[in-house]
Image: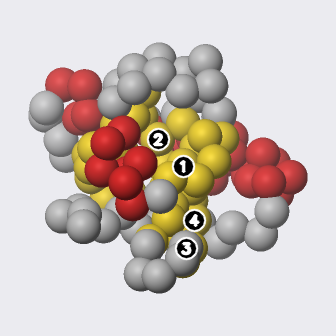
Amino acid sequence: MMEQTFVNGDIVRVTAPFLGEPENVLGYVYDEYSLSGNDHGVSVITENGCDLGGFSEDEQEKYLEFVRKSKYHYQFKNVIQLDRDFDNQIKPLFACSCERTGNCGC
């Protein structure tokens, strides 16, 4: 069972390369959902706008690392709307440099 449960609005670090995105790219959890049993899935889009899709609890534990809360809760409707909203609503959440410098004021 997972120690960390990721929720909508979390900024995460992806600890392995996925879909052409490099290891340690930052991502935003834009959706949460239930899988079979008590398994909690999350969907992640990277700072570069690549939708990595969903991660089961096992995949979250293996590939995602918590960075910080973003204070923004995205209302996911569909992937077309997510693509339209990315530049204005999600991309700005990665502007804080604290993930890279350790000096976080955001």
Q: Residue at x 30, y 50 (%)?
A: 61
Mark 2–mark 1 CB contact (< 8 Å): yes
Mark 2–mark 4 CB contact (< 8 Å): no
Label 3, label 4: how far apart the Cα atoms are: 13 Å
Label 1, label 4: how far apart the Cα atoms are: 7 Å
* Mark found first going from the N terminus, 1 or 4: 4
Label 4 environment density (alpha carbons within 10 Å; few <14, some 14–19, many ≥20): many
In the rendered view, does 7 fall on the left or right side of 97? Answer: right
Residue corresponding to mark 2: 27
Residue corresponding to mark 3: 35
Residue corresponding to mark 4: 31
Circle 1 or circle 3, nearest the eye: 3
Label 2, label 1: how far apart the Cα atoms are: 6 Å
Q: Secondary structure at mark 1?
A: strand
Label 1, label 3: how far apart the Cα atoms are: 16 Å
Q: Residue at x 47, y 58 (%)?
A: 56
| Residue 2: x %, y % from top left | 25, 63
Q: What amino acid type should be assigned to the residue bearing mark 4? A: Asp
32 relative to 66, above or below: below
Comparing 43 with 84, the one in front is: 43
